[in-house]
Amino acid sequence: MTDVAAVEAAVRRRFRDGSGPVQDPIAHLATLLEDESPLLHRDEAQRWAQRLAVELVGLGPIQALLDAADVSDVLVNGPGEVWVERSGRVCRTGVVVDRGMIDRAIERLVGPLGLRADRSHPIVDGRLPDGTRVTAVLPPLAVDGPLLAVRRHRRLAVPLADLADPDQAAVLAARVHQRRNIVVHGGTGSGKTTLLNALASLLPVDERIVTIEDVAELRLPGDGVVRLEARPGSADGVGRVAIRDLVRVALRLRPDRIVVGEVRGAEAADMVWAMSTGHDGSMSTVHASSAADALLRLEAFAVSAGDGVPIDAVRVQVRSAVQVLVGMARGSDGRRRVVDVHDVGSDGGVRRATR
């Protein structure tokens, strides 16, 4: 009779003590299992190897949650039960993790990115090769244990008709074709980037469009799309490239339009400048609860650039550059929807958009 615990312990030890990474961890684990238990059937060894691979090279119990088709976010709030966002709603999973599991998951996620997660680098933010976003916060900043948020990349674009009612969709399509500069506003998880993708799908495929993001999530059609992604730099901050740097570079790439995934700092000044100097039809998003608040936040961000432009001049420039404001929100049913569309008039006033 096979001593399962002894076999697994031996295989774990040999796998971890191996000389470097292997190309096919499951096949390697199956070989080790057959070596430790010669009477083991090949099919059974393969199934056993797959289960061990989740623990040894995957993310343990978190991996199964990430593999679920209806899960968009996995949220670890320290040792204890893991939460997920499933079909637009945050809910419990019944999956419980301890400190060691969380530490291993964080290391396996951020290590290959060249990032470090330790007491000297307690906040880590990165993107996996498949577009998945990873954010980790460690003690002492995270008082109750390490936090981990993993947001899966949505590969399929959501059509505009699924996000807006017919009148709103018609207004937005008209504004895109009229080359109006559009800013989408809303709270975290309200669907701002999802709407940006939907609007961008309406753009002519022959236009040269430069996208700029912290984490590349936009998937625009067309052959003229150029994608730029900011870089946080190494664990010591070397090689950092900010959104503002990329906006300035984009202006030299002869774009027809510029799409900035999210504005949350001094890059607002450069984005507004781009919108005002011939790059009509550009788009971006900003965290804000209303159209008026979105304009105020853009003004504050532009002033923070420290270019010495008076606040009154910044206000005029922002309100002449931004022509359409679109509000997004997530309802109690978890669905993300357009809640309002406003035009910004030539006088800087905000009024509800109509056809």
Image (spheres, rainbow, N blue to C red):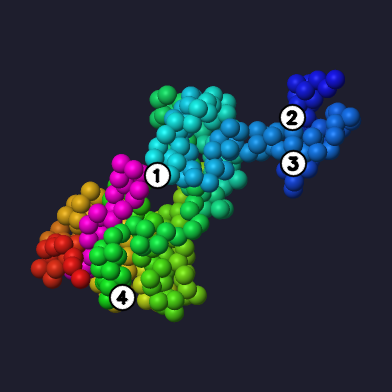
Q: Of the residues shown, which amino acid type is indicated by label 3?
A: Ile
CA gap between label 3 and label 4 equals 51 Å
Residue 126 visible in the snapshot: no
Give above or below for 133 relative to 39. Answer: below
Q: Is tag 3's residue or tag 1's residue first in the polypeptide sequence?
A: 3
Q: What residue is at 18 percent from the left and 67 percent from the top?
A: 354
Task: State left or right for residue 262 relative to residue 306.
Answer: right
Q: Disc 3 on helix, strand or loop?
A: helix
Disc number lying in front (3 or 2):
3
* Separation of residues labelled 2 and 4 (CA atoms): 59 Å
Three-letter code, disc 4: His
Query: Which-is-in-front pick, marks 2 and 1?
Result: 1
Give residue 354's mark. none
Question: Residue beneath label 4, please?
Answer: 177
Q: Which amino acid does label 1 sit on?
A: Gly
Residue 26's label in the rendered image is 3
SS at mark 4 in the image: helix
Label disc, if present, on residue 12 of the rendered structure: 2
N-term mark: 1 or 4: 1
Give me the C-alpha separation between circle 2 and circle 1.
Answer: 38 Å
Q: How crowded is mark 2: few (under 14 residues within 10 Å), some or many (20 or more)?
A: some
Pick whichever of labels 3 and 4 is earlier in the sequence. 3
Q: What residue type is labelled 2?
A: Arg
Q: What stretch is highlighted in magenta?
A: 319-341
